[in-house]
């Protein structure tokens, strides 16, 4: 049974090229195309495709408005096509909030649209999106409004030896979170639920390309009491802060006289990813501290499982996994559970509570 795809783009050239690329995979079939969001909404209702590829910028009705209507009226797995601009990144993050499963970036030049890399990514993402659990996607994420201004982050050279926040709290725990497909939306049900006076630093690896993690961090910061930023090299971990690995860079934690410090690297992918959850977890295991809470959430594949096993072996860490029912894709938590290192398997809406229990709150 072929995966039936509806292609939505205002450019006739892009509709043709995307259709040809999709149809090259024998298990896919483009059943129709649409020129704008209004047509897309109508054709989703009548054709009931398995997957929709949806452009963001279109006339009559743009991709975000169309996505919202599709998810409300006739939910279907959606793959967004996004531009690598600040506006495009912001719109992409918003689309993931509204229920899109994943996205790919449009090449900067029409001459790069038909390359092998683009073809491979489009085929792979359609396969991933097709397997998504729409029940999890259609559930609106919990959010809590930010109630205090975000102080300026201090860099290593101006910070005291013992990592402290502007409020003077001592860093008691490192909470390390790994996630992929469905992660940007799922994180909204975790990070904003944690209190601003948390005596821990949160580090996050979300599989996402360069140019999009800053928008994700800014969006998360706007809805959280915690202070959320895209991690920078040499940031010293402080309580009450969340550091999201920048796209295309590994995030590792090292220890020196300043405390726990972030080290970013562009060395080769680990477990097929950069940033990699495994790379982050291996670095935490090397710290030799017992003050670790590991969290593995929705995502395709097994990134994070071996790293968490290493953390569990080297430290007395508390490991939390998201359950299958609330995952968009259960691959990453499933792999960690199979390693036998997970202490608690809980639904998405219980992860923040489980973190606080492990903190002794």
Image (cartoon, rainbow, N blue to C red):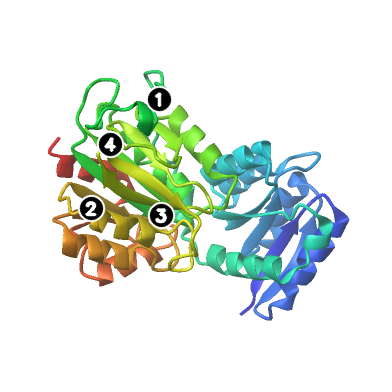
Circles 3 and 2 in contact, beta carbons < 8 Å: no
Which of these two is toward me, 275 or 140? 275
Decide if residue 244 is on the left or right side of residue 18: left
The image quarter containing residue 198 is top left
Give the mark nearer the N terminus: 1 vs 2.
1
Identify the residue position indicated by label 2 in the image. 287
The image quarter containing residue 325 is bottom left
Circles 3 and 4 in contact, beta carbons < 8 Å: no
Decide if residue 204 is on the left or right side of residue 10: left
Give the mark nearer the N terminus: 3 vs 2.
3
Whole-angstrom CA distance, mark 2 to mark 4, is 14 Å
Residue at point 21%, 49% (across, down): 292
User: In this view of the protein, can residue 346 be seen by the observer?
Assistant: no
Q: Is residue 41 above or below residue 268?
A: above
**Label 3 element class:** strand
Whole-angstrom CA distance, mark 1 to mark 4, is 32 Å
């Amino acid at each position: 049974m072929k995966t039936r795809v509806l292609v939505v783009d205002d450019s006739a050239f892009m509709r043709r090229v995307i259709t040809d690329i999709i149809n090259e995979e024998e298990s896919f079939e483009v059943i129709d195309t649409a020129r704008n969001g209004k047509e897309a909404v109508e054709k989703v209702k009548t054709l009931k495709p398995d997957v929709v590829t949806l452009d963001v910028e279109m006339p009559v009705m743009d991709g975000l408005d169309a996505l919202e209507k599709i998810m409300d009226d006739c939910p279907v797995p959606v793959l967004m096509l996004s531009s690598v601009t600040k506006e495009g990144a912001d719109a992409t993050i918003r689309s993931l909030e509204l229920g899109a499963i994943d996205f790919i970036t449009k090449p900067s030049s029409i001459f790069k649209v038909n390359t092998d890399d683009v073809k491979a990514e489009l085929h792979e993402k359609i396969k991933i999106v097709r397997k998504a659990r729409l029940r999890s996607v259609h559930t609106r994420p919990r959010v809590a409004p930010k109630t205090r201004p975000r102080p300026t982050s201090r860099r290593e050279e101006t910070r005291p030896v013992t990592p402290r926040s502007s409020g003077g709290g001592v860093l008691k725990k490192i909470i390390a979170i790994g996630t992929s497909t469905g992660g940007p939306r799922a994180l909204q049900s975790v990070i904003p639920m944690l209190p601003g006076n948390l005596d821990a630093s949160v580090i996050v690896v979300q599989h996402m390309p360069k140019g999009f993690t800053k928008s994700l961090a800014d969006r998360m910061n706007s809805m959280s009491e915690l202070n959320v930023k895209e991690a920078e090299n040499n940031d010293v971990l402080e309580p009450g802060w969340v550091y999201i690995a920048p796209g295309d860079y590994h995030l590792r934690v090292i220890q020196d006289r300043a405390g726990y410090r972030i080290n970013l690297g562009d060395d080769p992918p680990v477990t097929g990813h950069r940033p990699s959850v495994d790379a982050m977890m291996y670095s935490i295991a090397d710290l030799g501290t017992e003050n670790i809470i590991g969290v593995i959430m929705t995502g395709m594949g097994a990134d994070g499982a071996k790293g968490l096993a290493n953390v569990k072996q080297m430290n007395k860490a508390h490991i939390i996994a998201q359950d299958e029912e609330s995952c968009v894709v259960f691959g990453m938590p499933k792999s960690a559970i199979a390693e036998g290192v997970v202490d608690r398997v809980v639904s998405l809406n219980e992860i923040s509570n489980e973190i606080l229990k492990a903190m002794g709150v």
